[in-house]
Image (tube, rainbow, N blue to C red):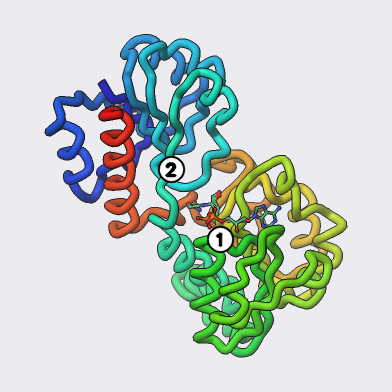
Amino acid sequence: KVFVSALSFSRYSSEPRRLLEEQGLELILNDTGRPLTEVEMKEALRRWQPVALIVGVDPVTCEVMEVATQLKIIAKHGVGVDNIDIPAAQRQGIVVTNAPGSNAQAVADLAFGLLLACTREIILADRTTRQGRWDRFVGGEVWEKTLGIIGTGRIGLAVARRARGFNMRILAYDPRPNLEATSELGIVYTDLEKLLQESDFISLHAPLTEDTYHLINEGRLRLMKKEAILINTARGELVDEEALYRALKEGWIRGAGLDVFSEEPPVGSPLLELDNVVVTPHIGAYTREANLRMGLAVAKNILKVLRG
Ligand code: NAD
């Protein structure tokens, strides 16, 4: 049996599902329409005793793994594995896989979409025009501005490639700089402080780890330009949202585009009350193309591990 908690697994193509079923695996789907809680994950795994788990953002803690005595592989339907306790999986001999690169173009498109939506206030313009108003907002331009990329992995570099088309100056911060990117894309690596001080747009593409939790805090928001726009398509916890709220409300920075939140959905978050924030419901990887790539990677990872 394979337990599928990831809601969008094989959503736009039956191929990933077929690959698993052809090998005699039975798929049991999360039918709640939302990610499961830790308690629900435990219940499901205890009940079904799957050999493989296909997971989205649902928590896979040590306790969850302990009830699943047959489990051989946890396959992340995506890239970020911060919801999986990897050391615990290693102790229990469970393989953890993800689908690197499968959604980089999708997330980079959305990051740029949010960037443009913020700087030209496209969402607010749409809303007010529908209301019968004709408020002609004066926005800013992207052409030849400075973009600061935090985390130059697969998504960060895909964003940089798009930025080249806008003739942007690209600054980057990453503890493991990619030297090819420096020559190929003209990225200039710098320290975080300089990046924050000089960038017109700052886009986050680092994983959530102990080092990146609240990477963007009050002190760092205060370093940014008053005109700066912050884009977060990485993980909500990279940003201290309470400090971000004050930064946006009090005008330390101009705006923010957010696909991710420390709590999802961000019910009751004061950020949702601000007009200078554009929000989307963690849809960075939600394109038909990325969905198929992620699904195929997941199916192949599972088959590889189960075949030993
Ligand atoms: P990746 O592993 O290819 O790249 C991550 C990069 O971040 C690496 O270059 C790494 O060196 C760098 N990094 C690590 N610690 C850092 C730090 N402290 N400061 C700056 N950089 C640091 O991953 P990716 O495919 O580019 O994805 C990046 C993140 O985006 C994922 O971990 C995930 O959390 C998030 N993501 C979000 C969505 C979405 O739907 N919004 C979809 C996919 C991925």
Distance from Cα at disc 1 to Cα at disc 2? 15 Å
For residue 241, side relative to residue 72 (left or right)? right
Above or below residue 2? Residue 142 is: below
Q: Is residue 294 visible?
A: yes
Inspect the image, locate mark 1, and give the three-letter code of the amino acid beneath it: Gly
Quadrant for ligand 1 reads: bottom right
Mark 1 or mark 2: whose residue is earlier in sequence: 2
Q: Position of residue 292 (x, y in %)?
A: 27, 52
Picture residue at 50% right of the left edge, 86% below the top: 165
**On the rendered image, what quadrant is the N terminus found in?**
top left
Inspect the image, locate mark 2, and give the three-letter code of the amino acid beneath it: Asn
Q: What is the secondary structure assignment of the residue under circle 2?
A: loop
Above or below residue 293? Residue 7 is: above
Picture residue at 53% right of the left edge, 69% below the top: 157
Above or below residue 52? Residue 303 is: below
Q: Residues within 10 Å of mark 1 (few under 14, many from 20)?
A: many
Q: Which residue is mark 2?
A: 98
**Distance from mark 1 CB to nearest ligand 1 atom below 8 Å:** yes
Q: Residues within 10 Å of mark 2 (few under 14, many from 20)?
A: many
Q: Which residue is mark 1?
A: 153
Question: What's the mark number on residue 70?
Answer: none
Q: Is residue 241 visible?
A: no
For residue 130, side relative to residue 295 (left or right)? right
Q: Position of residue 288 (x, y in %)?
A: 29, 57
Compare residues 296 and 196 and report the one nearer the observer: 296
